[in-house]
Amino acid sequence: MNNRSASIAVAISVDHPLVKPVSTSGGGFYVTAFALLIVMGWAFIAWLTQYIRGLGVSGLDRPVYWGVYITNFVFFVGISHAGTLISAILRVTGSEWRRPITRAAEAITVFALMVGPINVFFDLGRPDRVLNMFLHGQLKSPLMWDVICISTYLVSSLVYLYLPLIPDIAELRDTGIRPRWFYRLLSLNWRGTEKQKHILEKMIRVMAIAIIPIAVSVHTVVSWVFAMTIQPMWHSTIFGPYFVVGAIFSGIASIIIAMAILRKVYHLEDYLKPIHFNNLGILLLVMTCLWVYFTFAEYLTTFYGGEPAHMAVFYSKLTGEFAPMFWSMGILCFIIPFVILAVGRFRTITGTVIASISVNIGMWLERYTIVVPSLSNPRLPISEITYYPSWVEISITAGCFAGLTFFYVMFSKIFPIISIWELKEGGVDVAAGEVISSAATSGKKRMQ
Amino acid sequence: MKIEGIPGHPLNNGSLCPRGQSALQLLYHPHRLAYPVLNKGARGNGSLQRMTHEEAVGLLAEKIGDLVRRRQTHRLVIVSGSHSDTDELILRRFCDSVGTPNYIKIESLGRRSRSMAMGLSQGIFKPPSIDWSNCNFVMLFGSEPGTSDISPMWLLRGFGELRQGRAGRRAKIVHVSTHFSPFSSKVDDWIKIKPGTYGALALGIAHIIISEEKYDADFIEHFTLGFEEFKEVDGTLRPGFKEHVLNNYEPAKVSSITGVPEEVIIRLADEFSSNRPAVAYGGDGPASYSNAVSELVAIHSLNALIGSIDVPGGVLIQRDPPLRMPERVSNNSLFTHNLSQPPVDDSIRSSNLPVYMAGSNLPMRLSDSSPYPVEVLVLVDYDPLEEAPGPNYWREAFKQIPFVVSFCNFSDESSRICDLVIPPGTFLERWDGKSVDSSVGFPVWGLSRPVLETPLDGMDPSSFFMKLAKSMGHQIAGAFPWQSIEELLKEIAMDLNPSPGQVNPWDEIAAKGYWSQSPYRFGRQREVYQTRGNRFNFFMYSMEAAASHLRSAGYANLDKTGTDLAQSAFLPNHNSAEFENWDNRELFFLELFGTTLSGHGRHFSLEGLRELQELDLNKSWGLWLLINPRTASKLNLSNNEIVWVESNHGKLSARVKKVEGISEDSVGMIFGQDKGTEHSDTLSNSAMSLVGENISPLGGGLCWGTTKVRIYRA
Amino acid sequence: MTRWGMVIDLDRCSGCQACVVACRQENNIPVVGREQAAMGRAIFWMQIIEEREGGHNEGRTRYLPRPCMHCDNPPCVKVCPVGATYRNPEGLVGQIYARCIGCRYCTAACPYTARYFNWYEPSWEPPREKSLNPDVYVRPKGVVEKCSFCVHRIRKAQRKAKDENREIEDGEVIPACAETCPSKAIHFGDLDDPDSEVSKLAGSRRAFRLEEFLGTDPKVIYLREGEWSE
């Protein structure tokens, strides 16, 4: 391996497929970015309406005090588990095939973590008083736990995204891509010396280990927002792991989708190969099974206990008002992905992408059918109110998806979405634009 | 600002019912009219001219003055729905002095029948009072405390007292009704009964009590007349209640009429007769059917059977305060001749006959100009297009009358097509004196006065008509010698003796807000029974007299056939109720009922009340049709769906709400729901528009329960 | 120390809703209108709630007036991220309107659904504002509100007692709902005073509390309907 490290010093050309998205932008990019900005602009108008007139413009009501915003919050924070867990766990365990996908995954984490929590802000009746969270913060509130864990996670994810970026930024600086001052500034004077490399790799290793418990804590405390109350079908001890599993589940699905798009749009077929999709597909299959296990455990326990208040929620999901959503969730989160992923010959790029889209829609529904049915069936009194999201909530939700995509696209236009130096480390002759070693996919070699 | 009850007041003791609580919303309602408005040009779409109250007085004086000049004063009709005793006094006096027999008082639904039942059996034309605090067993026949127009406060208070007001004694409350309401869930025993059969159940219970000899023989001997068969001095044989009931109301038969199982009838009779003092009380339910009076008489006869009249825990007679009412001016009228014209509502009013016979449909006669055309119609606190049955007849009547005036605080359905609208202000802006309605028994006189200064101070109907009378000169002005309503009230209250230690009754009343004289005085047979022999009349002489009077006056008889009635018709009876089976398709009984929020629907346009959940529905706002879930699935209707409710008098659209408590052959609607909402000219939102002007032949009360409706998807 | 509590005698309660109207009048609760009410956005600090026992067809329906329970272990207070709702030493669960950020965590956590939210800026079409009670704050949009046990009346009575240099008497504090109740079903007082009316009633065999098993320790105690026996 050491004989390969010499090649790092060789600068790659601006036309290289890994650098080209950064160096040049075509019409497709502008159209996409413009379309996404329009959706975001519309969402901003919706939010402005809500800010001026009040939360009444949403479809929320009593007793369904929480709806789509909180669903989005849980969903996007769930997606954010993509990156970190994938890249951190794979990095820690030295899975070589991770090399081309870690950055794409980490970027999802960072942007999903920006989009997710802002939904809580959208949900506030008094956004103007959001600073009270800091002026009068109460540590006994699970919502404050979220604030602490998520901000920690966001900061560490940013660091964790940034650290492996430094050598690539230096690479871009060296190729002379504009704005030069930007890359020069961010490259932190990276020269690729052994000392620098040693420090960087050590920091990455520390971060990779540290970020795992942080990530686990984040979705645990998100689940505790619900589980710490005594509301029917929220007050459950398995919510922590259940939510974490769901988060990783939807996170992996998001990476697969992002990868497939990047591969297609940026012509990265040489780097993002069927084997990556296959391996991620197997991971997704494992998570599907874990998810269905938790879901089964959760619902069986509720059903077997048969407490009336819980059963009201239970039946509203299984046979009542929420049955269409609930069973769609079951099909989308388990039946479809399981069938596709369990059969080796369906585990193609197309197959895994279909499974992933299915999982992500399903997981959004899962979050919805956790948040809304419990509130729709309070212990007291009997409620006949049905919650429908208003145009404002739908617009803002669309804006969130557009925002996540927009930031992600922008990121891929500013930084290489595949870690160039890590590929080189993994034995890929990046400069030659071809793979000269099977090491990148063998998964047998350990870093250094 | 807040309204609270008067602590220590014999009726409310500091409490208020939901409708009383809402009065402030009336006072500060943004849509309240602030000044009189004259409609110039076509009614409904002419230009509106704002005027002062003084100008309105002048305008009305001119219109009535014209009638005076032409000696046609009887062509003035005043229809009043005002609850104020003072308005009653002033308006009647005004009509008397001008010379028109057409002061028509709109009483609250059911009241007339309930008064009549007491009148026929005890000679007291008032609904009964009950000594709740000493009662052990109460059978409520179609009566719910909170929904009544007659002292809901007192009934609600009684409800609490009966159960937890006395250590170690908890009365049983039985509720007999056609549908299971939230109140039914509050009582100890709910009995479901078929529509229009309350009296049969009462007489079935009487049958058991008599056959098991559980009646109060001592009371029957000393205080009743007609229990046993007897012979008049002239030899006429009068049938006895005992034989009549034993022969005609055996439990099996009653059970098949009422749908109440025999064993329940037997149980009720046992419990009623062995848990004295016990009381049977008839309410809106029986009063809504065509057989209202006889049903209420039958129910009240149970009280006589077990001696529950004028005893602690029994039926009391509400005593009136000794007011010094001004003498009537009928002999000093401007046109005494006009005063004795037949009234437009074709009613027979006789001071020596305890019968009020409303002949035929008032709006129909107004629109037919019979027996003479009406030229000036004054509506006081009454919106016939919303509140009266058959609103389309009223629309027609309006067209025939050249000048229509409405005293109302809000632009309502009727006032929108009037010539002159005069806002009279609320009860918080006026002087008024009121004797309590049937409730505590002992006399109470309440005084209300303006509580705050508003532009509508002194613009109430009483003050207005006093000003009007004074401006008209002649004897009319002479009939109103007082400077103000306050002065009149002072005179009326002159004889109310002050409490010990006080000198001036007026100052004391003005400070306290009421005058009362407790406790109730028992054992005054002449006050309690103002009938033949001063006894409870099982055999109702006055009913017989009324029947023969009607016949000789050329009216149909009480049973509308014109034939002689059997002697037993003057005993408590169950006559089957008539329903309007107007269509061959499937029809449902329309149960039109009040709730604690709606009452009889008169002030139900207040948003603050309509926003509350109707417990019957678990819904607020809107116009709802309550329907049994099985009926709904048979008709393939689901909740919230809009359906047409059609009777032979009109139709309206309402939203479906499935309610288990409604029986399968009925649908329910609540009085006054959606009142005050804008709607088209021909289609009313008022459930009352589905009801025909069916007047109980005896008593003249409106029977709003005779309607049957068809339900179909809109 | 005083521990304010309420006893509601269901045997006396007729379900007339006078308490609901009185509460809305007393506490300046705005009318939200037909559409908003249909969405379940009407505010009722005191509300008559329907409780069905057993199956839906067995007809055992119960109507209970439901104010805020002022739990001694309030689930709402725990979850508030900014301390806008708190339990004071007298046991009252209060709400600081000026601090509330409107996250509605407390409304979601309250097992009695006794908390309400101001979806829009409340408004009173003139001259309705004249009927407002000057003793009670009007809430802005976006904050949570609920029954306060008429704390302004408690404070008034306490001030009066202090001015007259005496202890506050049992029955001196009467919330608007209790005051108006025609059948006198609502009692209010100090649960820590063994001689108070509420303490005595709370010791009744008929006493129960809503969702007692949740351990919220409500200070609203219900007396169940009595049984009639010959």
Image: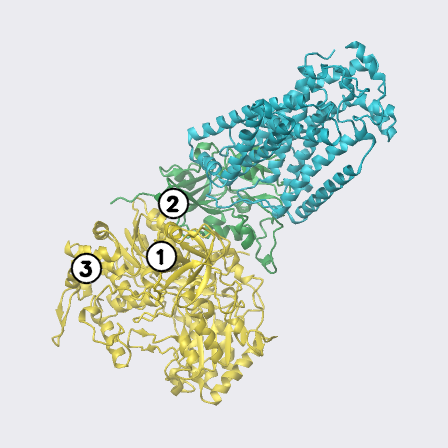
Sequence-wise, the earlier of marks 3 and 1 is 3
Residue kind at label 3, given as amino acid type? Tyr
Alpha carbon distance from label 3 to label 1 = 26 Å
A243 above or below C15?
Answer: above
Residue reaching furthest front?
A345
Q: Secondary structure at mark 2?
A: strand
Residue kind at label 2, given as amino acid type? Thr
Which residue does the numbered mark 1 point to in the structure image? B666
Residue drawn at point x = 39 percent, y = 57 percent: B668
A435 above or below A121?
Answer: above
Label 3 or label 1, whichever lies nearer to me, is: 1
Question: Which color is chain A depicted in?
Answer: cyan
Q: Which mark is residue C61?
A: 2
Q: Disc 2 sits on a residue from what chain? A: C
Q: Secondary structure at mark 1?
A: strand
In front of the other: B71 or B49: B49
Residue drawn at point x = 78 percent, y = 13 percent: A198
The yellow one among the chains is B
Quarter of the picture holding the N terminus of chain B: bottom right
